[in-house]
Image (cartoon, grey):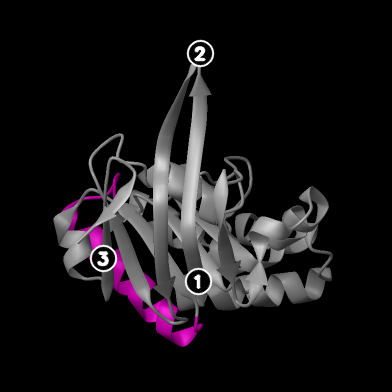
């Protein structure tokens, strides 16, 4: 469950304050795939950074799975990001010198999970996202864009997060592969009981979401 109340983020530029996110409130239950749409400069990326605890709001609150992350110390936020949030990026952001399975295992290593358990969960997740066994040991350069995004999704799931944030997850994919990836995210939201939020400019992606939020000049619009 994600609950956002009166969220505002201002940046100071010279003598002026610029509002990137303005008084945003929203609620998303577990197991839902939703999208955030808006033109460039609408505040989408800033909102995603706030939800992912990569930046702190000027005012307002964010609660994930009953935890008020806007009240956490920096140390607790590190632990929160590690265990409660998964990130998926347009450019995949896989480690190029690691194999697919090693990329998925990496977040679990940082969380102190034993090697045997890391391997078993990584294999399970790669199977879940539809990457065939013969590609588990391939490095990203030997995988297609769609396959790399599958690995990125498996990596985002590795620590069983309650919230997954996806930044233009289909931006580098053709329309057919993009639809496959969105269908996969929708399925994962249900099977893992995880809230998934995708920032996108693609109406076709938004059409597949259960909930779509639209931002304009930092504000939610109907």
Quadrant in which the C terminus is drawn = bottom left
Q: CA distance from mark 2 to mark 3?
A: 35 Å
Residue appearing at x 71%, y 58% in the figure: 71
Whether residue 90 appears in this view of the structure is no
Residue appearing at x 60%, y 71% in the figure: 161
Q: CA distance from mark 1 to mark 2?
A: 34 Å
Whether residue 60 appears in this view of the structure is yes
Does residue 171 show up magenta in the picture? yes
Return the residue at label 1: 2
Above or below, 117 against 175 in this view is below
Dot 1 or dot 3: first in sequence order is 1
Question: What element does badge 3 sit on?
Answer: strand
Does residue 12 show up magenta in the picture? no
Q: Are marks 2 and 3 in contact (CB under 8 Å)?
A: no
Return the residue at label 3: 212
Q: Name the disc covering residue 14, or none.
A: 2
Magenta range:
170-193
Q: Position of residue 136 (x, y in %)?
A: 55, 63
Image-quadrant location for residue 96: top right
Image-quadrant location for residue 36: bottom left
**Left/right of residue 164 with respect to residue 91 in the rendered view:** right
> What is the tally of numbered marks visible in this picture?
3
**Left/right of residue 80 with respect to residue 100 in the rendered view:** right
- Circle 2: is it few (<14), some (14-19), or many (20+) Cα within 10 Å? few
């Amino acid at each position: 469950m994600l609950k956002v109340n009166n969220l505002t983020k201002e940046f100071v530029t010279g003598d002026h304050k610029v509002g990137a996110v303005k008084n945003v409130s929203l609620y998303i239950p577990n197991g839902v795939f939703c999208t955030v749409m808006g033109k460039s400069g609408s505040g989408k990326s800033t909102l995603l950074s706030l939800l992912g605890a990569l930046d702190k709001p000027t005012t307002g609150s964010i609660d994930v799975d009953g935890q008020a992350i806007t009240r956490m110390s920096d140390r607790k936020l590190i632990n929160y990001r590690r265990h409660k949030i998964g990130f998926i990026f347009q450019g995949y952001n896989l480690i190029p010198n690691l194999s697919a399975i090693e990329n998925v295992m990496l977040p679990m290593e940082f969380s102190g999970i034993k090697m045997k358990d890391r391997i078993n969960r990584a294999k399970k997740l790669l199977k879940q996202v539809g990457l065939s066994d013969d590609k588990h040991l391939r490095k990203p350069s030997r995988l297609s864009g769609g396959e790399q995004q599958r690995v990125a999704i498996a990596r985002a799931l590795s620590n069983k997060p309650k919230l997954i944030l996806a930044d233009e997850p289909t931006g580098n994919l053709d329309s057919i592969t993009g639809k496959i990836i969105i269908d996969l995210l929708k399925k994962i939201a249900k099977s893992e009981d995880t809230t998934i939020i995708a920032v996108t400019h693609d109406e076709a992606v938004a059409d597949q979401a259960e909930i779509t939020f639209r931002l304009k000049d930092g504000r939610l619009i109907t």
